[in-house]
Image (tube, rainbow, N blue to C red):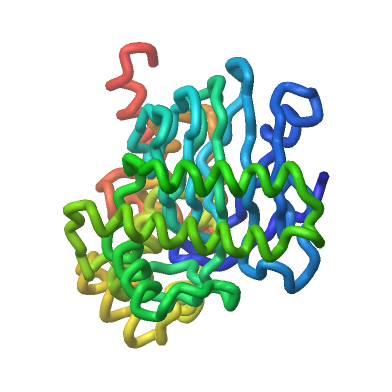
Amino acid sequence: MARTVPIFEGAEDTYQADTCLPLTRALEAGEIRLESWVHGHYPGRILPRGILSRVKSVGFWDATHDQTWGLDEHHNEGIELTFLETGTLGFAVNSKEFQLKADDLTITRPWQKHRVGLPNVTAGRLHWLILDVGIRRPDQPWHWPSWSVLAKHDLDELTQILRQNEYPVWRSTVEIRRCFQRIAKTIESYDIAQSVSRLTVQLNDLLLCVLEMLREQSIFLDDTLSQTKRSVSLFLNDLAQNTPLLRREWTVREMAATCGLGVTQFIHYCRLITNMTPVKYLNQCRLEAAAQILQHQPESTITAIAVECGFSSSQYFATAFYRQFGMSPTAYLKSAAKKDPSG
């Protein structure tokens, strides 16, 4: 089942899709039962090219006992719906934790990091659908698959709700439960060639039932969630939180392209959000990351920290660090050691 894991551009630079390695290992060890139809690297039976396009994975797992693994923070290549039929399950989105119970439905988008299992998966039956609607950033237009038969105004309404409200956990309905159960029966009981029509109808039914469920909720729609400024903000936040991204030799043009913008637009939004130019903001993120490393990894050398945080030389790093913090990296390290009782 080892397949190439795709790497794709997104609002927060480059994403690597969920590897599913813990799940694959549990499946191979006989710890869990899994049935799924997939395109790409996900575990399961491979759908022929052109069949149910944009479905990355649809299926379920059945864990009859608590597991010793979980799925760490990851992104998916599309919108992911999961439905917990039985049991309980720890779940987190952007570090906010939930305890799912039977009949809970989750909805996540490509830019929402999420975990399954806190830390480990517990006994239960979990269904899912990962559907690629052609988005990697919040401001991009959605493209539903050609096999969808929902009326345009229904798809437009579903799109608007999913773009402008990102709450991840919903109480499901009896109709949605039945949809997932029918999908599971099709996947485990029929050959792909003989049941494409059946599954296509069931997936359309699921989308309609999700829309009807959402219509019944008192949902606050926030159009700022789907604006260009949001995509830039997500990218800038990711720079600040991920030291590996800081090692990249960014140009302003590359930063702008990651957000799907021209240089002038990107600079405008960067100033609007941070009151800094992109280069100054990137430099500040690098310096703050370096300060964190100095505090928590005092054994690291100044040169190693400079390289890890994306500085071209230790000399330039030392000069920039002094301007930012009013002391050299070495002096900062000594100051941090004095404040640490264990130092």
The vertical placement of 30 against 285, above or below, is: above
Note whether 23 is above or below 141 in the view shown. Answer: above
Using the image as rendered, state which of residue 264 and residue 16 is in the foreground. 16
Q: Quadrant of the C terminus?
A: top left
Q: In the picture shown, does residue 30 fall above or below 243?
A: above
Foreground residue, 140 or 265?
A: 140
How many numbered badges does the structure rendering display? 0
- Measured from the top left, where is residue 247 in percent x and y? 54, 56
Is residue 157 placed above or below 92 in the rendered structure? below
Horizontal relation, residue 42 to residue 234: left or right: right
- Which residue is located at x 71 percent, y 30 percent? 33
Residue 306 position, x and y percent, is 51, 50
Could one spot residue 246 in this view of the protein? Answer: no
- Residue nearest the viewer, comparing 137 with 210: 210
Residue drawn at x 64%, y 45% is: 59
> Which quadrant holds residue 276?
bottom left
Residue 109 point in image, percent of width and height: 44, 57
Q: Quadrant of the N terminus?
A: top right
Would you identify the image quadrant in which residue 338 lies? top left
The residue sitting at 43% across, 68% down in the picture is 137
| Residue under the point 47% across and 81% down | 253
Q: Is residue 48 visible?
A: yes
